[in-house]
């Protein structure tokens, strides 16, 4: 069991990272916040011990991504429409890129987020999303191509 101080450190250290990952997959702030809360609950339930902070972060991201995937697969989520959210804290160019990233399928959004926003290498991403390295490499390549097309379309 983790102490309240240790849980406070975990929440303080990883909330923004997990929230960004969840939002990139779910495209909805409230659902992303729910996924992060559920991730922390699982952390408390499992009480895992890690060799390093990197392992801890990777475990939390893997759990968070799996929670998001399960959420996206639910029948309820597939039949609802999201409200358009404005992200006021981003510059116009960043907002346009993020909006284009959010148009990508979830499997591409995940690798884009982990590679560009979290700075993970391709082998690390493969471990986090539990896919072969070749699959992750292909997804990143295809995501970049789709993103380039989306950004060109938006510029025109």
Image: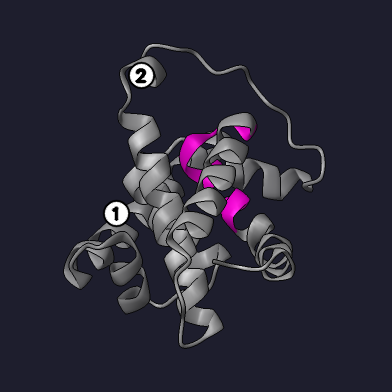
Q: Which mark is residue 142?
A: 1
Count residues near mark 2 (Cα–Cα under 10 Å), then give few for <14, some for 14-19, many for 20+: few
Residue at coordinates 69% horizontally, 50% vertically from top-left? 94
Q: Is residue 41 visible?
A: yes
Q: Which mark is residue 107?
A: none
Residue 107, placed above or below residue 120? above
Residue 142 placed where, x, y %? 29, 54
Residue 70 placed where, x, y %? 34, 37
Q: Which residues are magenta?
A: 18-29
Residue placed farthest to the bottom in the image?
A: 51
Q: Name the residue tied to disc 2.
A: 78
**Which element type, helix, strand or loop, lies under badge 1?**
helix
Residue at coordinates 44% horizontally, 48% vertically from top-left? 147
Residue at coordinates 69% horizontally, 67% vertically from top-left? 13
Residue at coordinates 79% horizontally, 48% vertically from top-left? 91
Which quadrant holds residue 134?
A: bottom left
Q: Is residue 146 visible?
A: no
Residue 36 placed where, x, y %? 57, 47
Quarter that holds the C terminus: top right
Horizontal side, residue 87 vs residue 20: left or right: right
Mark 1 or mark 2: whose residue is earlier in sequence: 2
């Amino acid at each position: 069991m983790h102490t309240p101080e240790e849980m406070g450190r975990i929440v303080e250290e990883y909330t923004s990272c997990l929230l960004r990952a969840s939002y990139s997959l779910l495209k909805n702030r409230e659902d992303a916040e729910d996924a992060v809360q559920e991730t922390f609950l699982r952390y408390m339930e499992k009480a895992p011990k890690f060799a390093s902070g990197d392992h801890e972060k990777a475990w939390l991201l893997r759990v968070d991504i799996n929670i998001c995937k399960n959420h996206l697969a639910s029948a309820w989520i597939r039949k609802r429409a999201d409200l358009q959210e404005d992200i006021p804290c981003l510059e116009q160019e960043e907002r346009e890129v993020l909006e284009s990233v959010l148009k990508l399928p979830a499997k591409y959004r995940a690798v884009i987020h982990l590679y560009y926003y979290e700075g993970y290498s391709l082998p690390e991403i493969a471990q986090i999303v539990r896919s072969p390295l070749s699959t992750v490499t292909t997804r990143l390549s295809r995501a970049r191509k789709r993103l380039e097309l989306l950004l060109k379309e938006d510029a025109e």
